[in-house]
Image: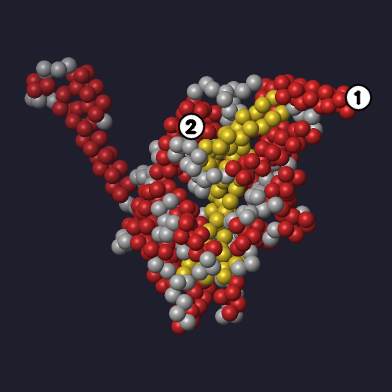
Amino acid sequence: MKNILRFIFIILSLYLYIVNGINIEAIVFAHEDMSEIYGFFENEFNNYSLNNNLNITLSINMLSTTNSSFSFINYGSTTDSLLKKKSNKYDIFIYDNLYISEYEPYLIDLTEYFEQDDINKFDQNILNKMCRHNNRLVGFPARINYSVLYSNKYLLSKYNKNIPKTWDELISTSKEILNEEKKLNNTDLISYNGLFNDSEGGFCSIYEFIYSFRSSVNSSFPEITSEETSNALEILKTLKSEISSDSIFLSNDAYTIDKLMSYRSLFIKFWMFHRPQIYRLQPFYNISALPGHIEGVNGSTICGYNLGIKKGIDKEKIEATIKAIKFFISDEFQKTVVKEKIMLSVIPRVYEDKKVCESVDCELFKSIQFIVRPVDKINDLNISIDEYIEKFRNYAYEFLYENQTLSDTIDKINDLTKIYYVSLDSKVTNAGIIIIIIILILMAIMATSLIFLFHKKLKPFFSFLPDSFWIISIMGCI
């Protein structure tokens, strides 16, 4: 009898939980199938909610190029249909932070709902660039990734070589090992893939390569017209011609993954793998930060997805979504996903935890110097981030793969964001002063021409219009 009553109690409890509970609907736009990651998110939170009697159920719906007709080419129209229309179908948006400007007007400012400690624990440089727009915090990092260097353990050990810390070291090590391996008829080995293809990843490769040529760790991204940028593009072209090729540099992700998984590569630049692939690669490759122009300076593009809450949902839903996001950004959850090699975290203190560092290479994360994709570059320009990335990449490729001069390439890239104006500073150019002098002379000539109105011999020639009209016309022209 007791067992029957207990069973009835459990059934009633479940019924009340389902009927009276709050359902949160989340949607994620993904480039690839990430069902394992977000399935883990969903299951972990729902278990947490059940164990803590929150009466909240989370459902994460994923749209990707593999499971729907969704395409990033039509990203704007998808955003329009789900955000601009007054629909409350989804409460949480998990979105690519590259498009934060598209989402910002439709998401709540999280600073109004989260304690400062929740915000300050993140790496502020990353958080401010990835999750803030128009001085509003419209997301927390949900999933991030960055590029690293995979170095073949066997080949480095065979030739007694170290993991390269600079691009010059990578070139010299590659030359030596490739030459020796060719003597052994190992012609299928590639030295360095670059990943400079016709995708957004190609832009990231160029951007982080330039970033790795700054003069010090604390230096900001080099100006496009700077000597650092010119040196970076010159070395990049040297790297391609001396240890790689056009076809290898232009190869897609599938080619790179094949070379990695078949261990037919010396150095590979690619995104940080998670489980299960990472378990297969770790015995054969050292994973480190990408090299830099000088030792101690490197660069890696960090990108990913943000968790944002839609405006306009009712108070009860907002409170429920805040509880869900607080769970995802909690130290406990972040440590779990890092230890399980499900994803990375941008909370620095996670990598100070001894248990975490027993499972992952915490020093690797600490050694990488991140650069965020330049969303802020186009804030005040009449150009989309997709257009900026495509043109930046194409102009750089004209120098890398074609016969475009370096100076022309630099000018084209710089023109994407440069606003031209006439300077009166003679140190910049004399053109401004010359133009101003010419304009002043012309204005003086036009003003003095009014004296002809009052010359007795010439006055009849202007009598067909009142004097006041002539004066107003000349002053208007001036």
Instruction: Indicate which disc, 1 or 2, sits on the residue closer to the N terminus.
Output: 1
Which residue corresponds to mark 1?
1
Q: Residues within 10 Å of mark 2 (few under 14, many from 20)?
A: some
Count of all numbered marks drawn on residues in the image: 2
Q: Nearer the viewer, residue 362 or 258?
A: 258
What residue do we see at 42% from left, 64% from top? Answer: 248
Question: Does residue 245 appear in this view?
Answer: yes
Q: Mark 1 belongs to which amino acid?
A: Met
Residue 291: x and y in percent read 55, 65
For marks 1 and 2, give the one nearer the viewer: 1
What residue do we see at 52% from left, 62% from top? Answer: 269
- When asked about the image quadrant of residue 182, the answer is bottom left
- Is residue 423 rendered to the left or right of residue 358? left
- Is residue 405 rendered to the left or right of residue 314? left
Gap in angstroms between the C-alphas marked 1 and 2: 56 Å
What residue do we see at 62% from left, 45% from top? Answer: 36
**Is residue 232 depicted above or below 27 in this figure?**
below
Question: Does residue 414 appear in this view?
Answer: no
- When asked about the image quadrant of residue 202, the answer is bottom left
Q: Which image quadrant: the C terminus?
A: top left
Q: Which image quadrant: the N terminus?
A: top right
- Is residue 390 rendered to the left or right of residue 4? left
Residue 104: x and y in percent read 54, 33
Q: Residue 79 — which label?
A: 2
SS for tag 1?
loop
Question: Going by the picture, which residue comes out furthest to the front?
Answer: 1
